[in-house]
Amino acid sequence: MFIPEVQLHEPASLDEVGEAMTDLADDARLLAGGTDLLVDLKTGRVRAGHLISLHRIGALRGVSEAKGGLRVGALTTITQLDRSRPVGERFPALREATSRMAAPQIRNAATVGGNIACAVPCADLPPILTAMKASVILWSTRGHREVALEAFFAGPRQTVRRNDEVLTAVEIPKPSPGFGAAYARFALRDGNAIAVASVAAGLWVDRGGAVREARIVLGAVAPVPKLVEAAGAELVGQAPDEDVFSRAADIARDAAEPISDVRGSADFRREIVGVLTRRALRAALRRAEEAK
Ligand SMILES: Cc1cc2nc3c(=O)[nH]c(=O)nc-3n(C[C@H](O)[C@H](O)[C@H](O)COP(=O)(O)OP(=O)(O)OC[C@H]3O[C@@H](n4cnc5c(N)ncnc54)[C@H](O)[C@@H]3O)c2cc1C
């Protein structure tokens, strides 16, 4: 299988990217790490005559602390995010995704922006970023707009990003006192295997120990990363314990819309969602209590 002939464009600024996107319109695709796109071109899932590479645009790289939160440039690789100081020190839940996805060779090339923009249902970053209330910044020649991650995905490989928009960054808000998050994933082996199911949990706990807010987000078991609001609502106002977590896990399990494929049946995936939800909630609670 070969990649069909394509013309590569290497603009040096966002303005040049905008021009190229306007000129080439639907016949072009943005190229970041290429770990998804080049496979899709080979298999024929995606057809394009032109690739507009983002690699010369340095402003799209890097991890920085902004207003106590985190700003991650879209072109930052998964390895760079995984090894960044703020993630190591303050965002352990993110590392549960960045350290487990794919394999080192892929993580060295794959970018954060690509992992989100590809909108593949089993992608690892969207669930945990959604649980942490992250948003994406979309740039076009008309300006910027910010979209909360839970509103970004429209279906498998579909998002609300317009054809002329570049995803430039992901912003994660400052974790408030009493906040903890965790990401639990199940794959058929530890390395280089995509998630069969995953669950991210975000918990906001008040000084008295009751849950103020909770987010439970499912990955790989629905057309888009699924924020199960009813599962979060089940926890609010409660002193979190195993009974409450089990009730939330049952709601999450029932909200899953999995398919059956070579990695597991729909029933198996539903069961796994219940198990992963309890695991993610326990880990998120430990972190929330440490952060009070
Ligand atoms: C062997 C293998 C194992 C993998 N395992 C995992 C895994 O365990 N977990 C996981 O989550 N993923 C996995 N992946 C998928 C892939 O590596 C990730 O989704 C990766 O993060 C995609 O990023 P990229 O930079 O390579 O994107 P690309 O392939 O360059 O692009 C992907 C799509 O996003 C668009 N795009 C990229 N950047 C932008 C941007 N800034 N703005 C707008 N659109 C953009 C492109 O046009 C394209 O449509 C695996 C891939 C392979 C080949």
Image (cartoon, rainbow, N blue to C red):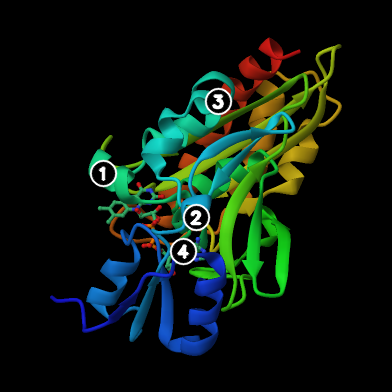
Q: Are marks 1 and 4 in contact (CB under 8 Å)?
A: no
On residue 113, which mark appears?
2
Badge 1 element: loop
Label 4, label 2: how far apart the Cα atoms are: 8 Å
- Could you say where residue 194 lies in the image, as x and y percent from the top left? 34, 49
Q: Amino acid at mark 1?
A: Asn
Is ligand 1 closer than 8 angstroms to the Cβ of mark 1? yes
Res 209 quadrant in image? top right
- Could you say where residue 14 lies in the image, as x and y percent from the top left? 55, 66
Residue under circle 1? 192
Marked residue nearer the N-terminal end (1 or 2): 2
Is ligand 1 closer than 8 angstroms to the Cβ of mark 4? yes
Residue under circle 3? 86
Q: Is residue 252 left or right of residue 192?
A: right
Label 2, label 3: how far apart the Cα atoms are: 18 Å
In this rendering, the count of numbered labels is: 4
How many residues crowd mark 3 within 10 Å: few (<14), some (14–19), many (20+)?
Answer: some
Q: From the image, which quarter does the C terminus lie in?
A: top right
Label 3, label 1: how far apart the Cα atoms are: 25 Å
Label 3, label 4: how far apart the Cα atoms are: 25 Å
Residue under circle 4? 118
- Could you say where residue 288 lies in the image, as x and y percent from the top left? 69, 19
How many residues crowd mark 4 within 10 Å: few (<14), some (14–19), many (20+)?
Answer: some
Given residues 265 and 80, the one toward you in this image is 80
Q: Amino acid at mark 2?
A: Gly
Q: Amino acid at mark 3?
A: Pro
Q: Is residue 231 left or right of residue 79?
A: right
Q: Are marks 1 and 2 in contact (CB under 8 Å)?
A: no
Q: For the point 65% across and 40% down, which residue is it?
A: 131
Q: For the point 26% across and 44% down, which residue is it?
A: 192
Marked residue nearer the N-terminal end (4 or 2): 2
